[in-house]
Image (cartoon, rainbow, N blue to C red):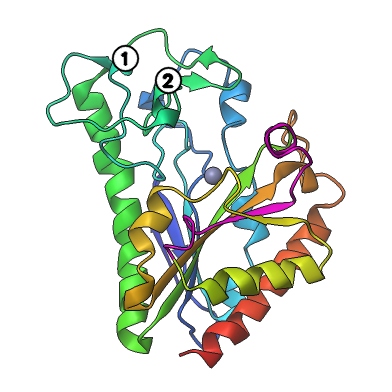
Amino acid sequence: MSFVIPSVLWRRDPETEEIPLVFDSPHSGSHYPEDFRFSCPLETLRRAEDTYVDELYAAAPAHGATLIGALFPRSYLDPNRGVDDIDEALIDGKWPTPLAPSQNTRAGLGLVRRVARPSTPIYDRKLSVDEVLARIERCHVPYHRVLDETCTRLHGKYGTVWHINCHSMPSKRSARDIGRPADFVLGDRDGTTCAKEFTEFVTVVLRRRGYDVRINEIYKGVEIVKRQGRPAARRHSLQIEVDRSLYMDQKTLAKNSNFAQLQADITYLIEMLGHFARERR
Ligand SMILES: [Zn+2]
């Protein structure tokens, strides 16, 4: 069975015996709403997407897990930011409540992005308070509600829930920042959003497939794992970033010849996580 909120999100439920394992892909949406009214080229904006990440994890429901994906684009509204993580420079007028802009937000990459990489302004105007509030109501609120309801229901039924927050990272950036490119970066906010054994299990499975896996380097996890991860309450949440050059051309956004191999390796990870979650119910 699956569930859809048009232009906002979809949820694909388990196709076999359910296990308390949830995947979500918050940045792979590419339905650009009419009221976005951006002024930069669409192809520049599209590079902010975690293109195809939902497809890489598409096997999750066949293995008893639940998969949730955003339909709206991340550059329109980023569900992986707090609702107070707003750049006041983008707003026309005064925001009605206190704001807590993060460092990324000051660089233009907040809840609503001001710039598309590389430093291209997205708008030729400021956004009204009502316009931003409408995006939060329409996208941020239901995304977190559906994810939270899913995890809460499974946790209530099985006493524990394992959640993976799925992303992809631009290849060049990891090469520049880390020195040599990592294939995967796992983020548990320095061990605070899940049991250590969860991060270790994913690391071992991916390393055995030949990948270079780093933990909490650059990408430590942001709003989604922060909200879902409460390991003391047996609610575990881990962020996974995969290098985009492993599966796509970052300029044309076309899949490359390695896509099927990476998808097969991620399907193997899902299967192994299925055993992991089943043994710990
Ligand atoms: Zn992402």
Q: Nearer the viewer, residue 112 or 9?
A: 112
Q: Which residue is labeled 2 in the image?
A: 114
Find numbered disc 2 in the image and state the secondary structure of the residue it sits on: loop
In the rendering, at what x and y percent does residue 246 appear?
79, 48
In the rendering, at what x and y percent does residue 162 appear?
47, 74
In the rendering, at what x and y percent does residue 118 appear?
61, 18
Residue kind at label 2, given as amino acid type? Arg
Locate the C terminus and report the quarter of the image it occupies. Answer: bottom left
Give how far apart the Cα atoms at labels 1 and 2 are. 9 Å
Sequence-wise first label, 1 or 2 = 1
Find numbered disc 1 in the image and state the secondary structure of the residue it sits on: helix
In the rendering, at what x and y percent does residue 189 appear?
46, 55
Neighbour tally class for label 2: few under 14, some 14-19, many 20 plus, Cα within 10 Å: many
Is the residue marked 1 within 8 Å of ligand 1, measured from its CB? no
Q: Is residue 219 left or right of residue 171?
A: left
Is residue 179 at all visible to an observer of this figure?
yes
> Magenta segment range?
173-193
Q: Residue at x 47, y 37 (%)?
A: 74
Q: Quadrant of ligand 1?
A: top right
Relative height, residue 158 to residue 267 (above, below):
below
Q: Would you say the residues marked 1 and 2 are in contact, meaning their CB atoms lie under 8 Å apart? A: yes
Q: Which residue is labeled 1 in the image?
A: 89
Q: Is residue 123 left or right of residue 130?
A: right
Is residue 5 at all visible to an observer of this figure?
no
Neighbour tally class for label 1: few under 14, some 14-19, many 20 plus, Cα within 10 Å: few
Q: Residue at x 30, y 83 (%)?
A: 156
